[in-house]
Image (cartoon, helix red, strand yellow):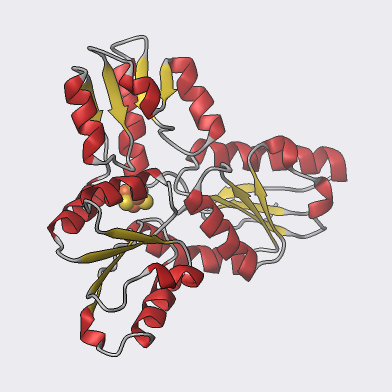
Amino acid sequence: MKVYVEIDQYSGFCNGVVRAVNSAEENLSKRSVLYSLGAIVHNETELKRLEKEGLRVINLEQMSHLKDSTVLIRAHGEPPSTYALAKQNNIKLIDCTCPVVLQLQKKIAETAGQIVIFGKVGHAEVNGLVGRAEGRAVVIENKEQIDKIDFSQPINIFSQTTKDPDEFEQLCNLISSRMEDKSMLTVHNTVCRQVAQRHARLIQFAENHNVIIFVSGKESSNGRVLYELCKSHNPRTYNIQSLQQIDKKWFKEGDRIGVCGATSTPKWQLTSCAEFLKIALKSYICSKFYSIIYGNYSRF
Ligand code: SF4
């Protein structure tokens, strides 16, 4: 049995997550325990690795009981109320809010009138954005919810950074079609450029392989979007959180297997998935030939 395994060279942490994880590791080299407000990355395996180094994930309620401590703010950012709480409790913040998210928060704070955010209700980044709008924001999760918008007022629409750019465009077109005066709609395309580029590349990657193993945590909203994208272009796409979920029945002779993931999936996890496939396919399907390659195909 011959199979090919390729890791998507564009998958792996986005810049915002790399920056936050690096900062956590750097700080943990100087102290034994560091608190993180919320999961620094939506990936259970990576979180367990960081936990072993001393990272402790806390929620807002737990932070409210901390005094004179140090807390890391993850790439998603936080609303102004969290900064006020830190000041009140003399908590030093290691602020790892992604610069792209910071820019978006600033833009929302400076925009007058009704703010519409296309995003997931309760998501940390969205909470941070809603906080910047000071009561003027309406969060829309999908096109079925557009009746939440006040169409008699000017509309400024923004997107959560990890949303599907095509879905955002479709939503904006639908909102525009409901408006008599189109000039009352201002679209701020705030999908992260890294995410937008990843969509186009991932479509190609999914189409160029027979099977896609998509590695991402259950909590990752970017993971859900990218998995659905792969699945819509390749029905033999499987989402896994751990290697134990891989089923040998998914693969056939001569398959080109693509391994990819979300912005919260570390590269090392993709590599170990590819290595696991090499061993599993060899032992279960008596594979005589296999190859692990990074970026290109090669046949053994
Ligand atoms: S997806 Fe983009 S905006 Fe969001 S944390 Fe990553 S780099 Fe920053």
Q: Position of residue 177 (x, y in %)?
A: 38, 87
Left or right position of 151 against 50: left
Asked if residue 206 is positioned above or below residue 5 in the image, the reply reads below
Whether 148 is drawn above or below 82: the answer is: below
Residue at x-position 71% and y-position 42%: 277
Q: Nearer the viewer, residue 20 or 156?
A: 156
- Going by the image, does 246 lie left or right of 46? right
Q: In the drawing, does residue 54 fall left or right of residue 99?
A: right
Q: Name the residue nearer the viewer: 241 or 143.
A: 143
Q: Residue 8, relative to residue 282: is it above or below?
A: below
Q: In the displayed image of the protein, which residue is found farthest to the bottom?
A: 180
Q: Residue at x 21, y 51 (%)?
A: 134
Which percent across, then down, holds residue 220? 51, 46
Q: Is residue 95 left or right of residue 219?
A: left
Residue at point 19%, 30% (across, down):
84
Query: Which residue is the extreme one toward the top?
Result: 32
Q: Is residue 186 visible?
A: yes
Q: Nearer the viewer, residue 161 or 197?
A: 161
Q: Quadrant of residue 227?
A: bottom right
Whether residue 1 appears in this view of the structure is no
Q: Position of residue 249 (x, y in %)?
A: 84, 51
Q: Where is residue 107, by image quadrant? A: bottom left
In percent of the image, x 21 and y 48: which residue is there?
102
Residue 228 is situated, as x and y percent measured from the top left of the image, at 59, 61
158 is higher (above) or lower (below) than 259: below
Number of marks present in the image shown = 0
